[in-house]
Image (cartoon, helix red, strand yellow):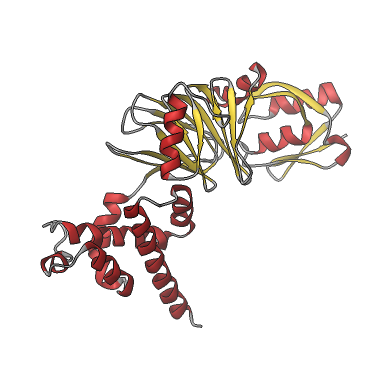
Amino acid sequence: MSIFNDQRHRRRKATREAAGWLARHEAGTIDEARFEAWRAAHPGNAIAFARALSVWRAAETPSSALPQVQPLAAAGLSRRRALGAFGGMGLVGLLAAGGVATRAYAWDSARSGIGECRRLILPDGSRAMLNTDSLLQWRFSDTERSLWIARGEVALELVPGIPARVHGQGLTAALSTGRFNVRLQTGAMDVTVLTGRAAASTSASSASSSSSSAIGSTRPAEVAAPNEGLLLSAADPSVRPASPQHMAATVAWQQGEIVFDNEPLQTAVQEYNRYLPGKIVIADPDLTGIPVGGRFTSTDPAAFLSALELGLDIRATPHEGGFILTR
C-alpha cells in the first residue's frame, strides 16, 4: 500500500469512527474517557470529529457562518441523514466547514518545558500551574469544565461552578471546587486533594453521578477528601490517606523545591531527572536502595549532589551535561 493510499485509508477510518462517536454523544451513551483517548490518539481523529460536528449542527440550523454546509440543510437533510451522509463522504469537500468547527470545538492548551513551571488563569477564573515538562488542555463553557492532562503534573485551584472533569491516560476524575494536584504516572492518574473532593468517573453519565456524590453528603469509597489521594488506573480506583510529609512533598514543586523523605536513591534520582536537561545516572547498582532525605532546589542539583557526597560518600562526576554517581 502506498503512503497516499495509507493516508486515504486513515482519513476514511477516522471519518467513520467520528460519526460513531457523534451518534453516541447525541444518544447520551458516549464514554467520555474512551472518547478523549480516541480523540488524542491522532490529530486526524480530532479533525474528523470537528467536521462531523459541523455537519451535524448545520443540518439542524443553517448559519451564514457556514456557507459551505447550507445546501445540506436547505435540502431538508435531517441530522440523522446528515451524519450518514458525512460517514460516506470524503473529507475534502468539508474542509472549510471543518475549519470553523475545529475552532469552535478546539481545546485551548499550554505547556511547560523541562525545569519550567507555568501559571495559568483558566476561562472561569480558576487557576492552574504546570510542573516541569507538562501539557494541559482545557475546554470551558456554561455546561462544561473539562481539563485534559496529556503529560506531566498540574496543580488546580477550581472556583465554584459546575463540577470539573479532568482526563489523563484514558482515565477521568470528577472534581468539586477546591485545590488539587494531578500527576500522570505510567498507566495511571494520581489526584491528591488539598481541599474539596475528587471522585472516580468512567463516562459522562458516571461523571455526573460521581460529581454529585463528591459534593454531596454521601461519600462512596472511591471519593477522596482533603489530605487524601485518589489513584486511577486500569484496576479499581483506590483512595489512600496522605501523610503531612507526603502532602509537603506533593506541593513542594510549586515553590521550586523537591522533597525526599527517606526515599530510595533510585527514586530520588528519577524524580530529580524530571527537572534536569542533563540527567543523573547511578553507575553502581548497589547505591540504588540507599535512603535519602532533605529539601532541595528542583532545578539545581548542586546541593543534592553535595549532600550525597558529604553524607553518603557518593561521588558525582560531571558527564555530558549530567552526572554519574559512584562510590
160 sits to left or right of 309:
left
Residue 302, image x, y percentages: 69, 27
Residue at 25% from the left image edge and 72% from the top image edge? 93
315 sits to left or right of 8:
right
Residue 62, image x, y percentages: 13, 59
User: Is residue 245 or residue 116 the one in the foreground?
Assistant: 245
Quarter the C terminus occupies: top right
Residue at the far top in the pictured view: 244
Residue 163, image x, y percentages: 39, 32
131 sits to left or right of 13:
right
Residue at 47% from the left image edge and 48% from the top image edge? 33
**Corner quadrant of residue 288:** top right
User: Is residue 3 or residue 107 the one in the foreground?
Assistant: 107
**Corner quadrant of residue 209:** top left
Report whether residue 37 is seen. Answer: yes
Q: How many marks?
A: 0
**In the depicted structure, whether residue 16 falls above or below residue 49:** below
325 sits to left or right of 195:
right
Residue at 66% from the left image edge and 42% from the top image edge? 278
